[in-house]
Image: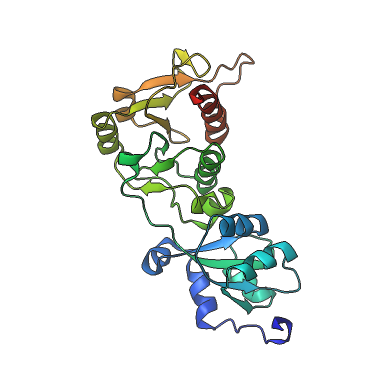
Amino acid sequence: MELNQRPLSLQNPRLKLAASLKQRKYRERHGLVLVEGERVIRQAVFYGARFKYFLVHFGSADPGALEAAYSTGAELLPVDLDGLRKVSDTPAPQGLIGVAEAVPKDAELLDRAQWIIVADRVRDPGNLGALIRIGKAADVEGIVSTKGSADLGHPRTIRASAGGYFGLPHLEGPEPDVLARRLINSGWRVVVAHAGAESDVFSFDWSGRIALVIGNEAEGPHPAFHNVGDRVKIPMPGGIESLNAAVAAGVIVYQAMHARRP
């Protein structure tokens, strides 16, 4: 029946609201985020994302993603390609864009969890989203992004997380030095990924409450974490100087997951 409806005008209030969510100030003002990509939408639905509505180009939307969108009970609003492009954060929209409630910060995460990732001033939304995706895949209990990191609700962060944004508890915005002190005072073992470390990830003791710190792409972790934590490295006998932050996190997280299993 939607095929017979007229596409929304580019001036339609709900289309304009969706387009505004590409900017952080409007995401924070409305408490909403954009969810784009067929697989991302299906995974977000699986994790219980609360969708307000979907913008759909019925001529190009993936049937599986449409089915997932229908299952939420949210309204499906038809748009033409111009409307889709106005809202999309990608150069080639896939036909379906969701508007969902932002996931609230988990203020009790550091009191409850035993195993988290700290994204310290990770500025690229793609890298931050990849850390979320890795953390959720490995059953890490949450992620903390320090002040200076990309926005967890950025469309590219959510897309790179493969929908994991809706399934992994998070805390956002603490200053690195404040967070470092709080972790130590609360009994956490701070473990800093650093190429110059003496200990390697395969021989390190991963027991206890672990906060794994993945640092800024250019500068590495804040000195506050070095002052209170242990440093670990990934052996690279092939001579490569360093790995991408997300790749390094994947190696470390899965080694830690293996070591932490009973």
For the residue pair 144 and 42, the one nearer the viewer reads as 42
Please, which residue is most extreme toward the front here?
262
The residue lying at 54 percent from left, 36 percent from top is 138
For the residue pair 160 and 242, the one nearer the viewer reads as 160
Total marks shown come to 0
Q: Judge whether 40 appears above or below 214 on screen.
A: below
Q: Estimate the x, y position of residue 224 in percent, counting from the top left.
A: 29, 29
Q: Determine which quarter of the picture holds residue 248.
A: top right
Q: Quarter of the image containing the N terminus? A: bottom right
Q: Is 24 displayed left or right of 88 in the figure?
A: left
Q: Determine which quarter of the picture holds residue 191.
A: top left
For the residue pair 181 and 19, the one nearer the viewer reads as 181
For the residue pair 204 and 73, the one nearer the viewer reads as 73
The residue lying at 52 percent from left, 34 percent from top is 245
Q: Estimate the x, y position of residue 241 in percent, counting from the top left.
A: 56, 21
Q: Estimate the x, y position of residue 121 in percent, counting from the top left.
A: 40, 40
Q: Judge whether 99 appears above or below 156 on screen.
A: below
Q: Is 2 displayed left or right of 175 in the figure?
A: right
In the rendered view, how is the structure colored?
A: rainbow
The residue lying at 36 percent from left, 50 percent from top is 106
Q: Estimate the x, y position of residue 93 in percent, counting from the top left.
A: 67, 64
Q: Determine which quarter of the picture holds residue 222.
A: top left
Q: Judge whether 219 appears above or below 206 on screen.
A: below
Q: Is 176 displayed left or right of 125 in the figure?
A: left
